[in-house]
């Protein structure tokens, strides 16, 4: 009898040990929950596919959900295999990373702009530089500092950035050169200005760039500037762009050097010199509101500038039909000089209202000069040309 009880006790103990081992094994295979509110979208459904970055990580680790690394630079190195997505947890991560030579299709996903902060580790470099990589997706974080917050150069193609806050970059919050890029739900604030004085929110050179629900506040010289290529502005706001040190510029949006622009919802408030400025470029679309355009200095100007909108062919002596402007549903209020100034372009307008503008001709705030052809709105033609600042803005890179 005693032998039987001992045997039974041993048997029960073996069963218990087996059960405990099974529980431990099961818990070990379950990945920890996302460390941030809402997870990382598609990464949440399969966190083991990603390379993970945490403030308490270790760059000697393998980057798994169980052993995260500490830096985005290390995560990019580990993600090269099959372009694995990168999931960054909450906290602040010193960063200056280049995606040069990385395979196409890389994703860098943070928790949210409130939780994940990529702070410049070198103010002379971009915080993130796609550097020729294609099919890159960036989302869910704040970028602080850097000469450029996010740099999309090297003919990077099909770049998507969304749900990002950029704060305090110098030369530009986002600078794009060539390729195709879409920016959605982006907020850019507090540009600090580079050594040459320029500090754009968004700059584009020869790119196919689309902006959806983008806001720029506190840029220097221009909030958004495009030089060549195309730019689509959808639900975009630019406010309080400051002038250069000499008091010039301070524009909301400048399209220059043969850019093709489209607009569907553009709000420009508190910018200087011009809210909207096109030079040797075409623009079409609707739903534009320009308010509180302040004066700025201009060499050779008897009057300081301060036009809600300027459309000019620049110094070229070309046919006005080369530069087509087609805008409807435009509201202008409070401009230190003109409501709209057309110079050597062809403009077709509809439903334009302008009030409280400082320079009127025959009680009209819309003025045409230098052979411009304007239709669809009440305007006056100037005999003496009002000068404007024809500076072609450099694109930082």
Image (cartoon, rainbow, N blue to C red):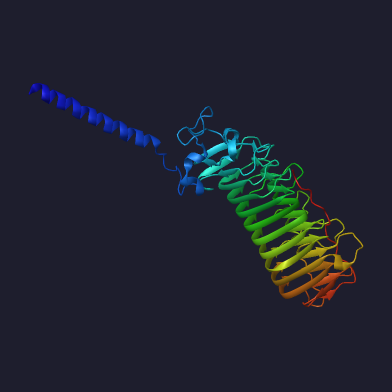
Above or below for 302 versus 13: below
Query: Residue 252 appears at what percent x and percent y?
Result: 71, 58
Q: Is residue 344 visible?
A: no
Query: Residue 5 appears at what percent x and percent y?
Result: 11, 25
Number of labels in the image equals: 0
> In percent of the image, x 41 and y 39: which residue is there?
32
- Looking at this view, name the residue that lies furthest to the right: 317
Q: Is residue 164 left or right of residue 304?
A: left
> In percent of the image, x 62 and y 35: which residue is there?
121
Query: Residue 80 appears at what percent x and percent y?
Result: 60, 36
Above or below for 350 versus 155: below
Of 18 and 313, nearer the camera is 18
Of 384 and 181, nearer the camera is 181
> In percent of the image, x 72 and y 54: which residue is there?
208
State the image quarter where residue 21 is shown. Answer: top left
Query: Residue 379 appears at what percent x and percent y?
Result: 80, 76
- Which quarter of the rendering shows the C terminus? top right
Above or below for 117 versus 389: above
- Looking at this view, name the residue that lies furthest to the top: 3
State the image quarter where residue 128 is shown. Answer: top right
- Which quarter of the rendering shows the N terminus? top left
Of 337 and 156, nearer the camera is 156
Q: Is residue 139 visible?
A: yes
């Amino acid at each position: 009898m005693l032998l039987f009880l001992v045997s039974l006790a041993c048997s029960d103990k073996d069963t218990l040990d087996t059960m405990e081992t099974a529980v431990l094994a099961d818990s070990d295979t379950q990945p920890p929950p996302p460390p941030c509110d809402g997870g990382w979208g598609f990464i949440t459904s399969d966190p083991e596919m990603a390379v993970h970055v945490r403030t308490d990580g270790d760059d000697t680790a393998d980057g798994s959900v169980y052993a995260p690394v500490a830096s985005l630079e290390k995560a990019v190195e580990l993600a090269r295999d099959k372009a694995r997505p990168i999931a960054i947890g909450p906290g602040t991560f010193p960063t200056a990373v280049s995606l040069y030579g990385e395979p196409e299709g890389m994703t860098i996903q943070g928790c949210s702009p409130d939780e994940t902060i990529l702070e410049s580790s070198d103010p002379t470099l971009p915080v993130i530089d796609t550097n020729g990589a294609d099919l890159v997706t960036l989302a869910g974080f704040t970028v602080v500092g850097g000469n450029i917050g996010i740099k999309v150069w090297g003919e990077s193609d099909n770049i998507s950035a969304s749900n990002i806050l950029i704060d305090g970059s110098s030369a530009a919050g986002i600078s794009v050169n060539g390729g195709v890029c879409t920016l959605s739900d982006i907020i850019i604030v507090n540009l600090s200005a580079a050594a040459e004085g320029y500090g754009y929110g968004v700059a584009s050179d020869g790119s196919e760039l689309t902006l959806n629900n983008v806001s720029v506040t506190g840029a220097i010289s221009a909030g958004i500037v495009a030089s060549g290529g195309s730019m689509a502005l959808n639900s975009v706001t630019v406010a309080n762009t400051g002038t250069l040190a000499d008091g010039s510029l301070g524009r909301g949006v400048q399209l220059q050097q043969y850019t093709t622009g489209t607009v569907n919802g553009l709000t420009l408030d508190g910018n200087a010199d011009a809210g909207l400025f096109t030079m040797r470029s075409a623009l079409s679309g609707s739903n534009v509101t320009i308010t509180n355009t302040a004066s700025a200095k201009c060499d050779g100007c008897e009057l300081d500038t301060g036009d809600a909108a300027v459309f000019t062919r620049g110094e070229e002596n070309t046919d006005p039909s080369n530069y087509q402007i087609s805008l409807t549903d435009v509201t202008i209020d409070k401009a230190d000089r003109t409501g709209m100034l057309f110079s050597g372009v062809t403009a077709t307008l509809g439903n334009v209202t302008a009030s409280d503008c400082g320079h009127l001709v025959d009680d009209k705030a819309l003025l045409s000069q230098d052979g411009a052809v304007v239709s669809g709105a009440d305007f006056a033609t100037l005999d003496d040309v009002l000068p404007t600042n024809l500076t072609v803005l450099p694109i930082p890179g």
